[in-house]
Image: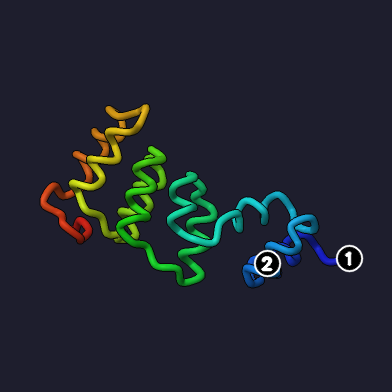
Amino acid sequence: MLPIELMDMMWLNCDKETLEKTRDLQSNYIKEITQYFDVNDSAKNGNIKNLKWLYNKGNKLNYLTFENAVFNGNLIILDWLLNNKCPYVYNRIIYHISKKDNVDEVLNWVNANCDKNSISMYKI
């Protein structure tokens, strides 16, 4: 039997179809990391491990990724996205904040970290 670390490495390099068909054989760790196959779904559902895995596999971050993270309200993901130069549109993220339970916390973070003049770029 292979060590779990080696098996996990093999799972992380499988294609989407294989991962979906073999969920019952995977560890909980792999199920979490490979839960979604789109960065926008991952950000919306607050799965940073999955988001990082997708990014490292070459998936591109886009303004919808940032908006979905705002919608989720996860400041750790928002920090990570900003640090990885994820584009955003300030007016659109303000709109999404208004739908959050933790409006003040997310709004304070956005105002402290995001360029209010951004129309499709990232803070430099």
* Residue 1 circle label: 1
Q: Is residue 66 left or right of residue 95?
A: right
Indicate the secondary structure of the residue bearing disc 2.
helix
Tell which circle, 1 or 2, labels the residue nearer the N-terminal end: 1
Kind of residue at disc 1: Met
Going 67% across and 52% down the picture, which residue do you hit? 29
Rendered location of residue 68, percent (x, y): 38, 48
Q: Position of residue 113 (x, y in %)?
A: 22, 45
Where residue 114 sits in the image (x, y, percent)?
Answer: 20, 47
- The numbered disc on residue 9 is 2
Q: Residues within 10 Å of mark 1 (few under 14, many from 20)?
A: few
Q: Residue furthest left?
A: 117
Above or below for 124 versus 44: below
Q: Quadrant of the C terminus?
A: bottom left
Name the quadrant containing residue 110.
top left
Q: Rounded to the nearest whole Å, what is the CA distance between mark 1 and mark 2?
A: 15 Å
Seen from the viewer's position, the closer of residues 46 and 10 is 46
